[in-house]
Image (cartoon, grey):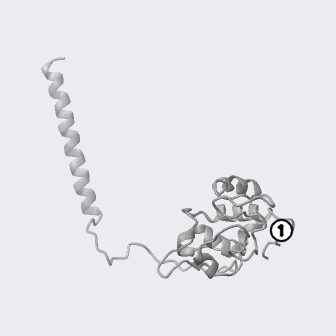
Amino acid sequence: MSGFEINKIIASIILALIVIGIISYVGNFVVNVDYKENQETAYKIDIPESDTGTPTRLNEGTEIIEPISSLLINASFEKGEKIYKKCASCHNYQKNSSAKIGPNLWDLINRPKGTMEGFSYSKSLVEFGGKWTYEELANFLYKPKNYINGTKMNFAGLKNVNDRANLIFWLRQQSDNPVPLPE
């Protein structure tokens, strides 16, 4: 390679750096890069409420959980079965099978919380009370530790509302007499 070619390569690199610097400077000039904590950076859009149920808020100041009732009618049994594989390491679902790390999930929908014989539930779950309705279970599966503070269930949660609906639809079928879907 001759000295002339090396000079062309070095000049090309310098020119590229200059072009990148100019683009960066112009970009910073066009877009305000000063971060202001109280500055609004988005437009507020009013969304009309739907009649599918009211969203649930985990704790004050946390995210809102979408209701699943309207999604259950179109939920996929096959997808729910695939999602259940995340649960299978800790839970059984067959009738009359024993508990693993977590309780048996057979006939779970509308079962009172903390009532499976032979399983030691956390005090917080037993005191929380109520039944495992469709929405209650969906809210719990979103982030178990946030929904019932002190629960022994060590699971990160299912963020996707369709995944929760598919899993709960599948769990609904694990019963001799599945609970009717909400209308």
Q: Residue furthest top?
A: 1
Quadrant location of the C terminus in the rendered image: bottom right
Residue drawn where x is 54% and y is 70% of the image: 145
Comparing 58 with 122, the one in front is 122
Q: Position of residue 163 (x, y in %)?
A: 65, 61
Report x, y in % for residue 107: 79, 67
Image position of 40 with respect to 33: above or below: below
- Left or right of 70? Residue 124 is left
Left or right, residue 30 beside residue 120 = left
Mark 1 sits on what residue?
178
Residue 76: quarter of image: bottom right
- Residue 96 x/y as whole percent: 80, 61
Question: In the rendered image of this protein, does residue 1 appear above or below residue 97?
Answer: above
Q: Residues within 10 Å of mark 1 (few under 14, many from 20)?
A: some
Q: Quadrant of the N terminus?
A: top left
Locate residue 84: give its quadrant: bottom right
> Furthest residue to the front?
118
Q: Quadrant of residue 57?
A: bottom right
